[in-house]
Image: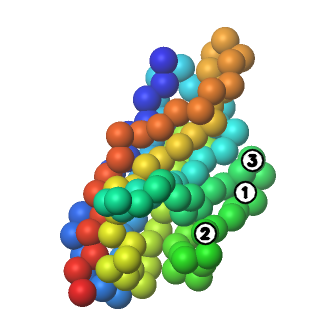
Amino acid sequence: QVQLVESGGGLVQAGGSLRLSCVASGSVSSINGMAWFRQAPGKQRELVAQVFTGGITDYGDSVKGRFTISRDTAKNTGFLQMDGLKPEDTAVYYCNANVRDYSGTNKSYWGQGTQVTVSS
């Protein structure tokens, strides 16, 4: 089994910064890609950022230039650096990872989510 655990959420004023972390543990042989999604109350879950094997990154239009996704492959950990936060960034942020386990099976996993609240 594989578990993803996020941390780093909290309450911050507009213009501030937060850094989210996502640690994959368990039967993790390798991680093919990691992504961060978010879901605000009453809205659909949306892609925030993703990083592919090789380090190629992609961002949602609303966060380009403010958020940075990265990963530490050796530690099976992903990060989302969020700068210039706005009240509209308030949401539950979820980590998603495509993991290859020790049996060679590729599967997508989700973390439990971490709340980010930006006050105006």
Q: Residue drawn 52% across and 58% down? A: 46
Question: Which quarter shows the C terminus?
Answer: bottom left
Of the residues shown, which amino acid type is indicated by label 2? Gly
Please give the residue where the numbered disc 1 appears in the rendered image.
Answer: 55
Q: Is residue 103 left or right of residue 41?
A: right
Of the residues shown, which amino acid type is indicated by label 1? Gly
Q: Nearer the viewer, residue 46 or 110?
A: 46
Q: Residue drawn 42% across and 84% down? A: 84
The answer for how far apart the CA atoms under marks 2 and 3 are is 18 Å
Q: Please provide percent x and percent y for residue 30.
A: 65, 32
Q: Is residue 68 above or below residue 92?
A: below
Q: Nearer the viewer, residue 53 or 43?
A: 43
Please give the residue where the numbered disc 2 appears in the rendered image.
Answer: 60
Q: Earlier in the sequence, mark 2 or mark 1?
A: 1
Q: Please provide percent x and percent y for residue 6.
A: 37, 47
Q: Tell me whether the residue at label 1 lies in contact with that at label 3, contact meaning CB atoms closer than 8 angstroms.
A: yes
Q: Residue drawn 59% across and 32% down? A: 108
Say which element carries label 1.
Answer: loop
Residue 79 in view here = no
Please give the residue where the numbered disc 3 appears in the rendered image.
Answer: 53
Residue 42, numbered circle? none
Q: Nearer the viewer, residue 110 or 54?
A: 110
Q: Please provide percent x and percent y for residue 49.
A: 59, 61
Residue 4 in view here = yes
Of the residues shown, which amino acid type is indicated by label 3? Thr
The quarter of the picture where residue 60 lies is: bottom right
